[in-house]
Amino acid sequence: MGIPLSQARLLIRESKRRPFEGSVLQLGKQLLSFTEKEFRHVAAEEKYRLTEVPESVQVQNPLKEWMDDVRFFRMLGFPSVDSLDINDFEGATILHDLNSPIPSDSILRGKFDLVFDGGTMEHVFHTPNFLANCIDLTKIWGRIVHSVPMDMVNHGFYNFSPTLFEDFYAVNHFEINSLLVWKKYHYQSDDSRLCTDARGDSQFIRSLHAGLFNGASHNVTAIVTKTEEISSVTIPMQGYYQRLFENADLVNSAGLTGGASRLKGVYQSLLGVPALGSLAKYMRNMYARSLIHWETI
């Protein structure tokens, strides 16, 4: 569980959209992989004014001094910073197993302005309870941020697709503020690339595969806002297939953007011819790459 400098930049951008305030709960105490100097440099690049807080002890690392998680979140505008974990091994302030629901009488329910999941969800076996707990911990108009892996083998129990967050939070009446895909060419690298929106109408954005990404590893970041009190969590059907069920014209679209067209008919015909089928798939993948615009962050 950690926050690279690229994730810090995304949090700065979210605070610029709507300023952070109040209380933040980290799901797992976060380890930051950058110095305060680097953080201030990114804030200056983003033209963002950090909150000045008293000096705190920095986490010592054999290579460099990394920022302390409490100081980091306070500089983003949160005077109250807590962390929740299954035990106090890393110094969490609240102990709870996220496989189990937050008790109905807990003072933690609806307490936090931001619930930050920087890579805990994939390590918790009971994903539905984890997501329900995120909702229960968040205030109305509070936000939840997930930053979890899409394709990291054996890093945790699971990898997650953007559609999980889009569909789950939409049916539970959350506002979807941001849904991003970002990639790294090396696990410890700070050179990250950001795909500006994972909610695009193109099926290529919704059905990404490793062949489009040149062997990099990818994370998905979802930022959502709780808009009303929720008494019972709704389990979603995957939105893409829901749309297919509601519109038969989208079925058999040959992996292209939904809707009928002459181009799709030609493409499907070419798939039946071995040599031309391979060329058609190659051209389709080239088109798919052209729809994905990466920004270095």
Image (spheres, rainbow, N blue to C red):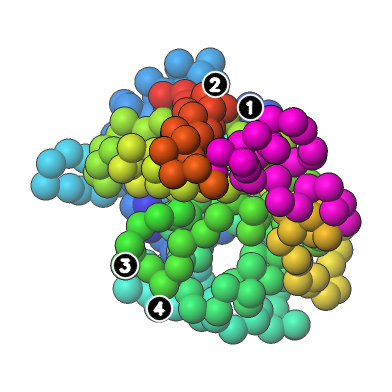
Does residue 256 show up magenta in the picture?
Answer: yes
Q: Position of residue 271 (x, y in %)?
A: 54, 44
Q: How far apart are the two marked residues, 4 and 3, measured between alpha carbons? A: 22 Å
What SS does tag 4 mark?
loop
Kindly state the secondary structure of the residue where label 3 is placed.
Answer: loop
Which quadrant of the figure contains the C terminus?
Answer: top left
| Residue 94 shown left or right of residue 156 in the figure | right
Question: What residue is pinned by disc 1?
Answer: 16
Which amino acid type is shown beneath numbered disc 1?
A: Lys
User: Which residues lie in the magenta part?
Assistant: 246-271
Helix, strand or loop status at disc 1: helix
Which residue sits at x=75%, y=41%? Answer: 258
| Disc 3 residue crowd, few under 14, some 14–19, many 20+, Cα 10 Å | few
Q: Which mark is residue 154?
A: 3
Residue at the (45%, 16%) spot, across then down: 45
Q: Answer left or right for 105 relative to 116.
A: right
Q: Position of residue 290 (x, y in %)?
A: 52, 24
Q: Tell me: residue 139, above or below residue 57.
A: below
Q: Earlier in the sequence, mark 1 or mark 4?
A: 1
As drawn, the label of residue 87 is 4
**Is the residue under label 2 in contact with that under label 1 (CB below 8 Å)?**
yes
